[in-house]
Image (cartoon, rainbow, N blue to C red):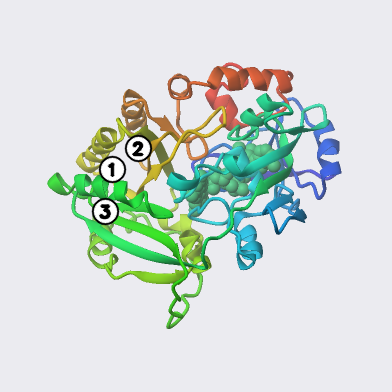
Amino acid sequence: MHWNQTKLKGWGRTCRAVCQVCRPERTEDVAKYLEQVGKNGIIARGLGHSYGDQAINDDGAVMVFRRMDRIRSFNEETGELVCEPGLTLRAVTELFSGRGFTAPITTGSGYHTLGAAVASDMFGSNAHKKGTISKFVNWIDVTLASGETVRADTQNNPDLFSATKGGMGLTGFISLISLTLPKRPAPNLKIRKERCPDLDTLMERLADGRKADICYAWIDTLAKGNAIGRGILTTATFTDEAAKPPLFRMPGIKLPFYLPNFIVNTFSSTLINDIFYRFFASPAEKVLPYEQFIYPKDMFLGWEKTRGRRGFYQFRFSFSEAEGPQAVRRILTEVSRTRAGSFMATLMPLKEESSADMSFPMKGYCLSLDFTRRRGIEEFLIHLETIASEHRGRISLQNDALLEPRNLQRMYKRLDDFKKTLATYDPHKKFDSSFARRLGLKGEPK
Ligand SMILES: Cc1cc2nc3c(=O)[nH]c(=O)nc-3n(C[C@H](O)[C@H](O)[C@H](O)COP(=O)(O)OP(=O)(O)OC[C@H]3O[C@@H](n4cnc5c(N)ncnc54)[C@H](O)[C@@H]3O)c2cc1C
Protein backbone atom coordinates (compact mmCIF):
# COMPACT_ATOMS: atom_id res chain seq x y z
CA MET A 1 0.00 0.00 0.00
CA HIS A 2 1.54 3.27 -1.09
CA TRP A 3 0.63 6.85 -0.07
CA ASN A 4 2.04 10.14 -1.43
CA GLN A 5 1.78 13.56 0.09
CA THR A 6 0.50 15.75 -2.76
CA LYS A 7 -0.86 19.26 -3.24
CA LEU A 8 -4.25 18.93 -4.93
CA LYS A 9 -6.57 21.56 -6.32
CA GLY A 10 -10.03 21.93 -7.74
CA TRP A 11 -10.32 22.72 -11.45
CA GLY A 12 -11.11 26.39 -10.79
CA ARG A 13 -7.82 26.66 -8.80
CA THR A 14 -9.53 28.59 -6.00
CA CYS A 15 -9.34 25.63 -3.58
CA ARG A 16 -6.10 23.80 -2.79
CA ALA A 17 -4.98 21.41 -0.09
CA VAL A 18 -2.12 19.13 0.88
CA CYS A 19 -3.46 15.57 1.03
CA GLN A 20 -2.22 12.00 1.51
CA VAL A 21 -3.02 10.34 -1.80
CA CYS A 22 -3.43 6.67 -2.76
CA ARG A 23 -4.26 5.17 -6.14
CA PRO A 24 -5.87 1.71 -5.98
CA GLU A 25 -5.48 -0.56 -9.00
CA ARG A 26 -8.28 -2.99 -8.17
CA THR A 27 -11.40 -3.30 -6.03
CA GLU A 28 -9.62 -5.40 -3.35
CA ASP A 29 -7.14 -2.54 -2.75
CA VAL A 30 -9.92 -0.12 -1.79
CA ALA A 31 -10.77 -1.81 1.52
CA LYS A 32 -7.05 -2.27 2.38
CA TYR A 33 -6.36 1.46 1.91
CA LEU A 34 -9.48 2.32 3.91
CA GLU A 35 -8.05 0.49 6.95
CA GLN A 36 -5.11 2.91 7.00
CA VAL A 37 -7.10 6.14 7.01
CA GLY A 38 -6.38 8.63 9.83
CA LYS A 39 -8.64 10.98 11.77
CA ASN A 40 -9.20 13.52 8.96
CA GLY A 41 -10.97 10.94 6.83
CA ILE A 42 -10.79 10.24 3.10
CA ILE A 43 -12.57 11.33 -0.07
CA ALA A 44 -12.72 9.86 -3.58
CA ARG A 45 -11.27 11.64 -6.58
CA GLY A 46 -11.58 10.94 -10.31
CA LEU A 47 -9.82 13.41 -12.57
CA GLY A 48 -10.25 16.37 -10.20
CA HIS A 49 -12.39 18.28 -12.71
CA SER A 50 -14.97 19.45 -10.21
CA TYR A 51 -14.44 23.17 -9.76
CA GLY A 52 -14.03 23.67 -6.02
CA ASP A 53 -13.18 21.63 -2.92
CA GLN A 54 -15.31 18.54 -3.71
CA ALA A 55 -12.42 16.15 -4.39
CA ILE A 56 -9.84 17.50 -1.92
CA ASN A 57 -9.42 16.88 1.78
CA ASP A 58 -7.26 19.39 3.64
CA ASP A 59 -4.80 17.50 5.88
CA GLY A 60 -6.66 14.28 5.16
CA ALA A 61 -6.59 11.43 2.65
CA VAL A 62 -7.74 11.18 -0.98
CA MET A 63 -8.30 8.00 -3.03
CA VAL A 64 -7.81 8.55 -6.77
CA PHE A 65 -9.89 6.10 -8.83
CA ARG A 66 -8.43 6.85 -12.25
CA ARG A 67 -6.57 3.51 -12.50
CA MET A 68 -9.68 1.46 -11.83
CA ASP A 69 -11.14 1.78 -15.32
CA ARG A 70 -11.86 -1.80 -16.44
CA ILE A 71 -14.95 -2.83 -18.34
CA ARG A 72 -16.46 -5.97 -16.80
CA SER A 73 -19.22 -6.62 -19.35
CA PHE A 74 -21.32 -5.08 -22.09
CA ASN A 75 -24.64 -6.37 -23.37
CA GLU A 76 -25.12 -5.47 -27.07
CA GLU A 77 -28.87 -6.17 -26.82
CA THR A 78 -29.73 -4.02 -23.80
CA GLY A 79 -26.82 -1.58 -23.74
CA GLU A 80 -25.97 -2.53 -20.14
CA LEU A 81 -22.38 -1.60 -19.33
CA VAL A 82 -20.78 -2.83 -16.12
CA CYS A 83 -17.52 -1.03 -15.39
CA GLU A 84 -15.18 0.33 -12.75
CA PRO A 85 -15.53 3.96 -11.67
CA GLY A 86 -12.35 5.30 -13.31
CA LEU A 87 -13.62 4.82 -16.89
CA THR A 88 -14.25 8.22 -18.49
CA LEU A 89 -17.31 9.43 -20.39
CA ARG A 90 -15.01 10.09 -23.33
CA ALA A 91 -13.81 6.47 -23.33
CA VAL A 92 -17.45 5.29 -23.27
CA THR A 93 -18.16 7.40 -26.36
CA GLU A 94 -15.00 6.25 -28.15
CA LEU A 95 -15.65 2.58 -27.39
CA PHE A 96 -19.41 2.36 -27.91
CA SER A 97 -20.57 5.02 -30.38
CA GLY A 98 -19.31 2.91 -33.30
CA ARG A 99 -21.55 0.11 -31.97
CA GLY A 100 -24.60 2.36 -32.10
CA PHE A 101 -24.72 3.59 -28.48
CA THR A 102 -24.09 6.94 -26.83
CA ALA A 103 -23.03 8.03 -23.37
CA PRO A 104 -26.27 8.90 -21.57
CA ILE A 105 -25.34 12.57 -21.10
CA THR A 106 -23.76 14.99 -23.58
CA THR A 107 -21.40 17.02 -21.41
CA GLY A 108 -19.12 19.87 -22.52
CA SER A 109 -16.04 17.73 -21.90
CA GLY A 110 -15.60 13.95 -21.88
CA TYR A 111 -12.86 14.03 -19.23
CA HIS A 112 -14.96 12.99 -16.24
CA THR A 113 -14.85 9.56 -14.62
CA LEU A 114 -18.08 7.60 -14.37
CA GLY A 115 -17.70 7.27 -10.59
CA ALA A 116 -17.64 11.07 -10.32
CA ALA A 117 -20.42 11.45 -12.90
CA VAL A 118 -22.68 9.33 -10.66
CA ALA A 119 -21.44 10.94 -7.43
CA SER A 120 -22.16 14.39 -8.97
CA ASP A 121 -25.35 13.28 -10.75
CA MET A 122 -24.00 14.91 -13.91
CA PHE A 123 -26.07 16.04 -16.86
CA GLY A 124 -25.41 17.62 -20.23
CA SER A 125 -27.00 19.60 -23.03
CA ASN A 126 -29.53 16.77 -23.58
CA ALA A 127 -30.87 17.19 -20.00
CA HIS A 128 -34.24 18.48 -21.26
CA LYS A 129 -34.74 15.05 -22.92
CA LYS A 130 -32.71 12.58 -20.87
CA GLY A 131 -32.42 14.12 -17.40
CA THR A 132 -29.28 13.31 -15.38
CA ILE A 133 -27.03 10.24 -15.40
CA SER A 134 -28.90 8.82 -12.36
CA LYS A 135 -31.71 7.77 -14.63
CA PHE A 136 -29.43 5.36 -16.47
CA VAL A 137 -27.80 3.76 -13.43
CA ASN A 138 -29.18 0.27 -12.69
CA TRP A 139 -27.07 -0.40 -9.62
CA ILE A 140 -23.83 0.54 -7.95
CA ASP A 141 -21.48 -1.32 -5.63
CA VAL A 142 -20.48 0.95 -2.76
CA THR A 143 -17.50 0.27 -0.49
CA LEU A 144 -18.49 1.49 2.95
CA ALA A 145 -16.37 2.82 5.83
CA SER A 146 -16.15 -0.71 7.32
CA GLY A 147 -14.50 -1.97 4.11
CA GLU A 148 -17.59 -4.01 3.23
CA THR A 149 -18.93 -3.58 -0.31
CA VAL A 150 -22.71 -3.58 -0.74
CA ARG A 151 -24.95 -3.34 -3.77
CA ALA A 152 -27.34 -0.38 -3.93
CA ASP A 153 -30.29 0.00 -6.28
CA THR A 154 -34.00 0.76 -6.00
CA GLN A 155 -34.61 -2.59 -4.17
CA ASN A 156 -31.41 -3.09 -2.14
CA ASN A 157 -30.29 -0.28 0.18
CA PRO A 158 -32.47 2.28 -1.65
CA ASP A 159 -31.51 5.03 0.85
CA LEU A 160 -27.83 4.48 0.07
CA PHE A 161 -28.63 4.48 -3.67
CA SER A 162 -30.37 7.88 -3.60
CA ALA A 163 -27.76 9.42 -1.29
CA THR A 164 -24.74 8.17 -3.27
CA LYS A 165 -26.04 9.52 -6.60
CA GLY A 166 -25.16 13.21 -6.31
CA GLY A 167 -23.67 12.59 -2.83
CA MET A 168 -20.19 13.91 -3.73
CA GLY A 169 -18.42 10.80 -2.47
CA LEU A 170 -19.60 11.21 1.15
CA THR A 171 -21.52 7.94 1.60
CA GLY A 172 -18.72 5.63 0.43
CA PHE A 173 -16.73 4.71 -2.66
CA ILE A 174 -18.50 3.62 -5.83
CA SER A 175 -16.44 0.61 -6.86
CA LEU A 176 -18.58 -0.85 -9.68
CA ILE A 177 -21.34 0.65 -11.82
CA SER A 178 -24.04 -0.81 -14.04
CA LEU A 179 -25.58 1.67 -16.40
CA THR A 180 -27.64 1.39 -19.55
CA LEU A 181 -26.24 3.17 -22.58
CA PRO A 182 -28.98 4.58 -24.81
CA LYS A 183 -29.10 3.51 -28.46
CA ARG A 184 -27.98 6.21 -30.84
CA PRO A 185 -30.99 7.01 -33.07
CA ALA A 186 -28.82 8.01 -36.08
CA PRO A 187 -25.13 8.48 -36.77
CA ASN A 188 -25.13 12.24 -37.38
CA LEU A 189 -26.48 15.45 -35.88
CA LYS A 190 -28.14 18.32 -37.71
CA ILE A 191 -26.93 21.49 -36.01
CA ARG A 192 -28.57 24.85 -36.07
CA LYS A 193 -27.34 28.10 -34.55
CA GLU A 194 -29.52 31.13 -34.07
CA ARG A 195 -28.71 34.64 -32.89
CA CYS A 196 -31.20 35.99 -30.31
CA PRO A 197 -30.95 39.78 -29.74
CA ASP A 198 -32.38 39.87 -26.19
CA LEU A 199 -33.48 37.68 -23.30
CA ASP A 200 -37.17 37.50 -24.25
CA THR A 201 -36.28 36.17 -27.69
CA LEU A 202 -33.74 33.76 -26.21
CA MET A 203 -36.27 32.35 -23.74
CA GLU A 204 -38.88 31.96 -26.47
CA ARG A 205 -36.45 30.18 -28.81
CA LEU A 206 -35.14 28.02 -25.95
CA ALA A 207 -38.70 26.78 -25.35
CA ASP A 208 -38.84 25.71 -28.99
CA GLY A 209 -35.34 24.23 -28.71
CA ARG A 210 -36.67 21.64 -26.25
CA LYS A 211 -37.86 19.63 -29.27
CA ALA A 212 -34.24 19.07 -30.39
CA ASP A 213 -32.06 16.29 -28.92
CA ILE A 214 -29.44 18.76 -27.71
CA CYS A 215 -30.12 22.37 -26.77
CA TYR A 216 -28.12 25.13 -25.08
CA ALA A 217 -27.48 28.83 -25.43
CA TRP A 218 -24.35 30.92 -25.02
CA ILE A 219 -25.09 34.31 -23.41
CA ASP A 220 -23.17 37.56 -23.77
CA THR A 221 -23.12 38.68 -20.13
CA LEU A 222 -21.53 42.01 -20.97
CA ALA A 223 -24.39 43.20 -23.18
CA LYS A 224 -26.22 46.23 -21.74
CA GLY A 225 -29.72 47.74 -21.69
CA ASN A 226 -32.22 46.12 -24.03
CA ALA A 227 -29.55 43.69 -25.25
CA ILE A 228 -29.20 42.02 -21.82
CA GLY A 229 -29.49 38.28 -22.34
CA ARG A 230 -28.57 38.34 -26.02
CA GLY A 231 -27.01 35.10 -27.11
CA ILE A 232 -26.65 32.26 -29.55
CA LEU A 233 -28.93 29.25 -29.34
CA THR A 234 -27.49 25.93 -30.53
CA THR A 235 -29.75 22.96 -31.20
CA ALA A 236 -28.83 19.55 -32.60
CA THR A 237 -31.09 16.71 -33.73
CA PHE A 238 -30.09 13.17 -34.72
CA THR A 239 -30.34 12.59 -38.46
CA ASP A 240 -29.54 9.95 -41.08
CA GLU A 241 -28.61 12.70 -43.54
CA ALA A 242 -25.02 12.37 -44.69
CA ALA A 243 -22.41 14.52 -43.01
CA LYS A 244 -20.10 16.48 -45.26
CA PRO A 245 -16.51 15.44 -44.63
CA PRO A 246 -14.69 18.43 -43.07
CA LEU A 247 -12.27 20.35 -45.33
CA PHE A 248 -9.73 20.07 -42.57
CA ARG A 249 -9.76 18.76 -39.03
CA MET A 250 -8.93 21.24 -36.28
CA PRO A 251 -6.09 19.77 -34.24
CA GLY A 252 -6.47 19.78 -30.44
CA ILE A 253 -4.98 23.02 -29.15
CA LYS A 254 -2.82 22.80 -26.05
CA LEU A 255 -2.61 26.15 -24.30
CA PRO A 256 0.97 26.29 -23.03
CA PHE A 257 0.49 29.14 -20.52
CA TYR A 258 -2.14 31.00 -18.50
CA LEU A 259 -3.54 34.02 -20.31
CA PRO A 260 -2.06 37.12 -18.66
CA ASN A 261 -4.35 39.22 -16.45
CA PHE A 262 -4.34 42.21 -18.83
CA ILE A 263 -6.02 40.00 -21.46
CA VAL A 264 -8.50 38.48 -19.03
CA ASN A 265 -10.37 41.70 -18.27
CA THR A 266 -13.79 43.23 -18.89
CA PHE A 267 -12.69 45.31 -21.88
CA SER A 268 -11.19 42.36 -23.77
CA SER A 269 -14.10 40.11 -22.84
CA THR A 270 -16.61 42.67 -24.18
CA LEU A 271 -14.72 42.71 -27.47
CA ILE A 272 -14.44 38.91 -27.67
CA ASN A 273 -18.14 38.48 -26.80
CA ASP A 274 -19.12 41.00 -29.46
CA ILE A 275 -17.06 39.25 -32.14
CA PHE A 276 -18.43 35.88 -31.06
CA TYR A 277 -22.04 37.10 -31.11
CA ARG A 278 -21.74 38.72 -34.55
CA PHE A 279 -19.66 36.17 -36.43
CA PHE A 280 -20.07 32.73 -34.83
CA ALA A 281 -23.72 32.00 -35.51
CA SER A 282 -23.93 31.14 -39.17
CA PRO A 283 -27.68 30.50 -39.69
CA ALA A 284 -27.08 27.65 -42.19
CA GLU A 285 -27.78 24.13 -40.87
CA LYS A 286 -24.81 21.79 -40.67
CA VAL A 287 -24.69 17.99 -40.47
CA LEU A 288 -21.81 16.58 -38.43
CA PRO A 289 -20.93 13.10 -37.15
CA TYR A 290 -22.06 12.77 -33.52
CA GLU A 291 -18.50 12.17 -32.27
CA GLN A 292 -17.29 15.36 -33.90
CA PHE A 293 -19.93 17.57 -32.32
CA ILE A 294 -19.80 16.50 -28.68
CA TYR A 295 -17.16 17.50 -26.11
CA PRO A 296 -16.45 20.96 -27.62
CA LYS A 297 -14.38 21.94 -24.58
CA ASP A 298 -11.89 19.14 -25.21
CA MET A 299 -10.59 20.97 -28.27
CA PHE A 300 -8.59 23.13 -25.88
CA LEU A 301 -6.37 21.07 -23.63
CA GLY A 302 -5.81 23.34 -20.65
CA TRP A 303 -9.12 25.19 -21.17
CA GLU A 304 -8.84 26.53 -17.61
CA LYS A 305 -5.76 28.53 -18.62
CA THR A 306 -7.99 30.86 -20.64
CA ARG A 307 -9.31 32.17 -17.30
CA GLY A 308 -5.93 33.51 -16.15
CA ARG A 309 -3.60 32.46 -13.38
CA ARG A 310 -5.75 33.76 -10.53
CA GLY A 311 -8.28 30.97 -10.98
CA PHE A 312 -12.01 31.24 -11.41
CA TYR A 313 -15.38 30.32 -9.97
CA GLN A 314 -18.22 28.64 -11.76
CA PHE A 315 -21.72 29.43 -10.55
CA ARG A 316 -24.40 27.11 -11.79
CA PHE A 317 -28.05 27.71 -10.89
CA SER A 318 -31.25 25.81 -11.55
CA PHE A 319 -34.65 27.50 -11.52
CA SER A 320 -38.20 26.29 -11.99
CA GLU A 321 -40.12 27.17 -15.15
CA ALA A 322 -42.14 29.75 -13.26
CA GLU A 323 -39.19 31.53 -11.58
CA GLY A 324 -36.60 31.00 -14.34
CA PRO A 325 -37.20 33.94 -16.70
CA GLN A 326 -37.34 36.49 -13.89
CA ALA A 327 -34.41 35.01 -11.95
CA VAL A 328 -32.20 34.78 -15.05
CA ARG A 329 -33.02 38.40 -15.97
CA ARG A 330 -32.19 39.61 -12.44
CA ILE A 331 -28.87 37.79 -12.36
CA LEU A 332 -27.82 38.88 -15.86
CA THR A 333 -28.78 42.48 -15.05
CA GLU A 334 -26.61 42.39 -11.91
CA VAL A 335 -23.68 40.91 -13.86
CA SER A 336 -24.04 43.54 -16.61
CA ARG A 337 -24.53 46.45 -14.16
CA THR A 338 -21.46 45.62 -12.08
CA ARG A 339 -19.37 44.66 -15.17
CA ALA A 340 -18.39 41.58 -13.18
CA GLY A 341 -17.66 40.00 -16.56
CA SER A 342 -18.46 36.35 -16.74
CA PHE A 343 -16.32 34.75 -19.44
CA MET A 344 -18.53 31.89 -20.17
CA ALA A 345 -22.27 31.85 -19.65
CA THR A 346 -24.71 29.22 -20.81
CA LEU A 347 -28.39 28.63 -20.38
CA MET A 348 -30.17 25.35 -21.00
CA PRO A 349 -33.56 23.81 -20.41
CA LEU A 350 -33.97 21.06 -17.82
CA LYS A 351 -36.51 18.27 -17.85
CA GLU A 352 -37.07 17.29 -14.23
CA GLU A 353 -35.74 16.66 -10.73
CA SER A 354 -33.60 13.55 -10.48
CA SER A 355 -34.02 10.66 -8.06
CA ALA A 356 -30.94 11.71 -6.07
CA ASP A 357 -31.45 13.13 -2.56
CA MET A 358 -29.29 16.09 -3.51
CA SER A 359 -30.84 16.58 -6.95
CA PHE A 360 -29.67 19.85 -8.48
CA PRO A 361 -31.90 20.04 -11.57
CA MET A 362 -35.57 20.95 -11.46
CA LYS A 363 -38.04 21.23 -14.32
CA GLY A 364 -36.98 24.56 -15.76
CA TYR A 365 -33.60 26.11 -16.53
CA CYS A 366 -29.92 25.88 -15.75
CA LEU A 367 -27.74 29.01 -15.90
CA SER A 368 -23.94 28.64 -15.64
CA LEU A 369 -21.54 31.55 -15.25
CA ASP A 370 -17.72 31.54 -14.95
CA PHE A 371 -16.02 34.44 -13.12
CA THR A 372 -12.31 35.12 -12.91
CA ARG A 373 -11.14 35.45 -9.33
CA ARG A 374 -10.42 39.05 -8.39
CA ARG A 375 -10.89 41.44 -5.50
CA GLY A 376 -14.51 41.62 -4.35
CA ILE A 377 -15.78 38.79 -6.57
CA GLU A 378 -16.57 36.47 -3.65
CA GLU A 379 -18.93 39.07 -2.07
CA PHE A 380 -20.61 39.57 -5.43
CA LEU A 381 -21.12 35.84 -5.92
CA ILE A 382 -22.61 35.49 -2.44
CA HIS A 383 -25.00 38.30 -3.45
CA LEU A 384 -25.97 36.24 -6.56
CA GLU A 385 -26.44 33.24 -4.29
CA THR A 386 -28.95 35.24 -2.24
CA ILE A 387 -30.85 36.29 -5.40
CA ALA A 388 -30.96 32.64 -6.48
CA SER A 389 -32.33 31.58 -3.13
CA GLU A 390 -35.02 34.32 -3.27
CA HIS A 391 -36.19 32.72 -6.52
CA ARG A 392 -36.16 29.26 -4.95
CA GLY A 393 -33.23 28.31 -7.16
CA ARG A 394 -30.42 25.86 -6.39
CA ILE A 395 -26.67 26.08 -6.74
CA SER A 396 -24.93 23.06 -8.21
CA LEU A 397 -22.76 21.40 -5.57
CA GLN A 398 -20.23 19.97 -8.03
CA ASN A 399 -19.35 23.45 -9.34
CA ASP A 400 -19.58 25.43 -6.14
CA ALA A 401 -16.79 26.77 -3.93
CA LEU A 402 -18.62 29.41 -1.90
CA LEU A 403 -22.09 28.21 -0.91
CA GLU A 404 -23.00 28.85 2.72
CA PRO A 405 -24.69 26.18 4.92
CA ARG A 406 -27.83 28.31 5.50
CA ASN A 407 -28.45 28.52 1.74
CA LEU A 408 -27.73 24.82 1.27
CA GLN A 409 -30.55 24.08 3.72
CA ARG A 410 -32.93 26.40 1.86
CA MET A 411 -32.08 25.05 -1.58
CA TYR A 412 -31.95 21.31 -0.97
CA LYS A 413 -35.23 20.12 0.54
CA ARG A 414 -34.05 16.53 1.07
CA LEU A 415 -30.88 17.58 2.89
CA ASP A 416 -32.08 16.07 6.20
CA ASP A 417 -32.72 12.67 4.54
CA PHE A 418 -29.26 12.86 3.01
CA LYS A 419 -27.60 13.65 6.35
CA LYS A 420 -29.53 10.81 8.00
CA THR A 421 -28.21 8.35 5.42
CA LEU A 422 -24.66 9.66 5.90
CA ALA A 423 -25.00 9.07 9.66
CA THR A 424 -26.38 5.52 9.08
CA TYR A 425 -23.71 4.33 6.66
CA ASP A 426 -20.75 6.35 7.92
CA PRO A 427 -21.29 6.92 11.68
CA HIS A 428 -17.60 7.62 12.37
CA LYS A 429 -17.27 10.15 9.54
CA LYS A 430 -14.56 8.29 7.66
CA PHE A 431 -15.61 9.87 4.35
CA ASP A 432 -14.87 13.54 4.61
CA SER A 433 -13.68 16.39 2.40
CA SER A 434 -12.95 20.12 2.49
CA PHE A 435 -16.34 20.55 0.78
CA ALA A 436 -18.21 18.53 3.44
CA ARG A 437 -16.56 20.51 6.25
CA ARG A 438 -17.37 23.88 4.61
CA LEU A 439 -21.04 22.93 4.33
CA GLY A 440 -21.32 21.12 7.65
CA LEU A 441 -22.45 17.89 6.00
CA LYS A 442 -20.73 15.73 8.60
CA GLY A 443 -21.18 17.92 11.67
CA GLU A 444 -20.74 21.63 12.39
CA PRO A 445 -19.36 23.66 9.43
CA LYS A 446 -15.65 24.60 9.65
C1 LIG B 1 -14.48 21.55 -18.80
C2 LIG B 1 -15.54 21.05 -17.88
C3 LIG B 1 -16.80 20.77 -18.36
C4 LIG B 1 -17.81 20.31 -17.49
N1 LIG B 1 -19.02 20.03 -18.00
C5 LIG B 1 -19.98 19.53 -17.19
C6 LIG B 1 -21.26 19.19 -17.72
O1 LIG B 1 -21.52 19.33 -18.91
N2 LIG B 1 -22.19 18.68 -16.86
C7 LIG B 1 -21.93 18.49 -15.53
O2 LIG B 1 -22.83 17.99 -14.82
N3 LIG B 1 -20.71 18.81 -15.01
C8 LIG B 1 -19.76 19.32 -15.80
N4 LIG B 1 -18.52 19.64 -15.27
C9 LIG B 1 -18.28 19.44 -13.83
C10 LIG B 1 -17.39 18.21 -13.48
O3 LIG B 1 -16.87 17.66 -14.55
C11 LIG B 1 -18.02 17.18 -12.60
O4 LIG B 1 -18.13 17.73 -11.34
C12 LIG B 1 -17.33 15.77 -12.53
O5 LIG B 1 -17.76 15.14 -11.38
C13 LIG B 1 -15.84 15.81 -12.52
O6 LIG B 1 -15.35 14.52 -12.84
P1 LIG B 1 -13.98 14.03 -12.23
O7 LIG B 1 -13.75 12.62 -12.66
O8 LIG B 1 -12.91 14.98 -12.52
O9 LIG B 1 -14.35 14.03 -10.67
P2 LIG B 1 -13.65 14.71 -9.41
O10 LIG B 1 -13.65 16.17 -9.55
O11 LIG B 1 -12.37 14.07 -9.13
O12 LIG B 1 -14.73 14.30 -8.27
C14 LIG B 1 -16.02 14.85 -8.27
C15 LIG B 1 -16.83 14.29 -7.09
O13 LIG B 1 -17.10 12.91 -7.32
C16 LIG B 1 -16.66 12.14 -6.19
N5 LIG B 1 -16.17 10.85 -6.69
C17 LIG B 1 -15.25 10.64 -7.63
N6 LIG B 1 -15.06 9.31 -7.82
C18 LIG B 1 -15.88 8.66 -6.94
C19 LIG B 1 -16.10 7.31 -6.60
N7 LIG B 1 -15.47 6.30 -7.22
N8 LIG B 1 -16.99 7.03 -5.61
C20 LIG B 1 -17.66 8.03 -4.95
N9 LIG B 1 -17.47 9.31 -5.23
C21 LIG B 1 -16.60 9.66 -6.22
C22 LIG B 1 -15.59 12.98 -5.54
O14 LIG B 1 -15.44 12.67 -4.17
C23 LIG B 1 -16.10 14.39 -5.77
O15 LIG B 1 -16.99 14.74 -4.74
C24 LIG B 1 -17.53 20.13 -16.11
C25 LIG B 1 -16.24 20.41 -15.64
C26 LIG B 1 -15.26 20.86 -16.50
C27 LIG B 1 -13.90 21.14 -15.95
Label 1: element kind: loop
Q: Say whether marks 2 and 1 touch (CB < 8 Å).
A: yes
Quadrant of the frame with the N terminus:
top right
**Comes first in the chain, label 1 or label 3:** 3
Q: Position of residue 331 (x, y in %)?
A: 28, 36
Classify mark 1: residues with Cα within 10 Å, few (<14), some (14-19) or many (20+). many
Q: Residue 159: give its label.
A: none
Quadrant of the frame with the C terminus:
top right
| Residue receiving disc 1 | 340
Which image quadrant is residue 374 in? top left
| Residue receiving disc 2 | 377
Outermost residue toward the front? 77
Instruction: Tell me if residue 361 comes above or below residue 191 in the rendering.
Output: above
What whole-number distance in Å separates the C-alpha atoms at marks 2 and 1? 8 Å
Q: Nearer the viewer, residue 351 or 374?
A: 351
Q: Say whether marks 1 and 3 touch (CB < 8 Å).
A: no
Marks 3, 2: nearer the viewer: 3
| Residue receiving disc 3 | 231
**Comes first in the chain, label 3 or label 2:** 3
For the point 33% across and 53% down, which residue is it? 218
What whole-number distance in Å separates the C-alpha atoms at marks 1 and 3? 18 Å
Instruction: Tell me if residue 255 comes above or below residue 28 in the rendering.
Output: below
**Comes first in the chain, label 2 or label 1:** 1
Instruction: Tell me if residue 215 comes above or below residue 151 in the rendering.
Output: below
Residue 239 visible in the picture = yes
